[in-house]
Image (tube, grey):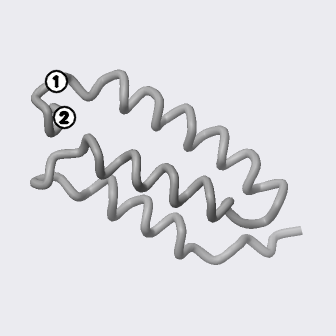
Amino acid sequence: MICVDGSSAVANLDQLEKELLDERNRASERGSIDREWFQKTMRWLVEWIPETDMSLIAALGKIARAKPSTAS
């Protein structure tokens, strides 16, 4: 993937993967994602993602709308 500025998105995607995994762990402890983390991550994502590829933004939106797990 190429960033909107024409540079490679590899570093950004690696950082996003790490942050998603970290937040998944924290969210499993809390029972939901951190709203501030989500907003900050979404703003950062739209800064570099090409307007022609909204799949990552859509995927983050799905995560934010997901209902908390009620498994015991």
Tell me residue 7's x, y (percent): 16, 23
Local secondary structure at mark 2: loop
Residues marked 1 and 2 touching at CB (< 8 Å): yes
Tell me residue 22's x, y (percent): 66, 39
What's the residue at 63%, 64% (across, down)?
35
Residue 11 occupies quadrant: top left
Residue 42 occupies quadrant: bottom left
Tell me residue 70's x, y (percent): 79, 75
| Mark 1 residue crowding within 10 angstroms, few (<14) / some (14–19) / many (20+) | few
| Mark 2 residue crowding within 10 angstroms, few (<14) / some (14–19) / many (20+) | some
Is residue 20 shown above or below 59?
above
What's the residue at 26%, 41% (across, down)?
48
Q: Which labelled disc corresponds to residue 55?
A: none
Q: Quadrant of the N terminus?
A: top left
Q: Which residue is mark 1?
A: 7
Closest to the observer, 70 or 35: 35
Closest to the observer, 37 or 22: 37
Is residue 47 shown above or below 57?
above
Residue 38 vs residue 30: left or right?
left
Closest to the observer, 4 or 19: 4
What's the residue at 47%, 29% (across, down)?
15
What's the residue at 81%, 70% (across, down)?
71
Tell me residue 20's x, y (percent): 55, 43
Distance (Cα) linking label 1 and label 2: 5 Å
Tag 1: amino acid: Ser
Q: Which labelled disc corresponds to residue 3?
A: 2
Tag 2: amino acid: Cys
Residue 58 vs residue 4: left or right?
right
Q: Quadrant of the C terminus?
A: bottom right
